[in-house]
Amino acid sequence: MCRPPLPPFTEDSAKEKVRLAEDGWNSRDPAKVALAYTPDSRWRNRVEFPLGRAEIEAFLTRKWTRELEYRLIKELWAFAGNRIAVRYAYEYRDDSGQWFRAYGNENWDFAEDGLMAHRHASINEHSIREDERKFHWPLGRRPHDQPGLSDLDL
């Protein structure tokens, strides 16, 4: 399996890779998203350490069962060779109706075939009122006219 764009990344190909990752996560389809990672991909996500696609898929299934109306924006921070660093924010609500905004940074390491071999995420979140939400597009892919993180001062 090959997942373009492939390393080594240019600024344009790194931005494309980031947008493709954002689109995948906004699909909230754990099986589809897990295919972007190597079969033995290693993650660090807060206090969880999924290893391999099956554990990644299970992690994402749990995540999106709890995080309702999930909307994510990712932005390229830096890149070199086969590595990309991103910053991101996402909003969701829990089953009681409480809204949250999470902020994070990720470091990605890619195999030659363009699949992500390592993902290291650092995330924090806080509750927000519904009227403080900034991500209002219909569920799914973020439209091109929706502002990015820098445009929203996030």
Image (cartoon, rainbow, N blue to C red):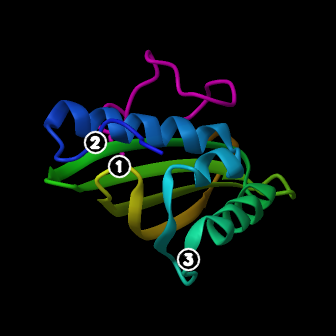
Per the image, the residue denoted by label 1 is 113
Circle 2 Cα neighbour tier, 10 Å, few/some/many (<14 / 14–19 / ≥20): some
Give percent across and percent down for residue 106: 36, 62
Alpha carbon separation for disc pair 2 and 1: 6 Å
Magenta residues (range): 135-154
Per the image, the residue denoted by label 2 is 6
Is tag 2's residue or tag 1's residue first in the polypeptide sequence?
Answer: 2
User: On the image, which quarter does residue 94 sit in?
Assistant: bottom right
Give the residue drawn at x 76%, y 65%: 62
Circle 1 Cα neighbour tier, 10 Å, few/some/many (<14 / 14–19 / ≥20): some
For the residues bearing labels 3 and 2, Cβ distance under 8 angstroms: no
Q: Is residue 40 above or below residue 76?
A: below
User: On the image, which quarter does residue 4 sit in?
Assistant: top left
Q: Is residue 29 visible?
A: yes
Mark 3: amino acid:
Leu
Residue furthest top in the image: 145
Secondary structure mostly seen in the magenta stretch: loop
Q: How many marks?
A: 3
Mark 2: amino acid:
Leu
Is tag 3's residue or tag 1's residue first in the polypeptide sequence?
Answer: 3
Per the image, the residue denoted by label 3 is 51
For the residues bearing labels 2 and 1, Cβ distance under 8 angstroms: yes
Give the residue drawn at x 40%, y 44%: 74
Instruction: Name the side, left or right, on which 142 lies relative to 96.
Output: left
Q: Is residue 148 magenta?
A: yes
Residue 54 shows which numbered tag?
A: none
Is tag 3's residue or tag 2's residue first in the polypeptide sequence?
Answer: 2
Instruction: Name the side, left or right, on which 134 lies relative to 113.
Output: right
Mark 1: amino acid:
Asp
Give the residue drawn at x 40%, y 26%: 147
Q: Is residue 88 magenta?
A: no
Alpha carbon separation for disc pair 3 and 2: 22 Å
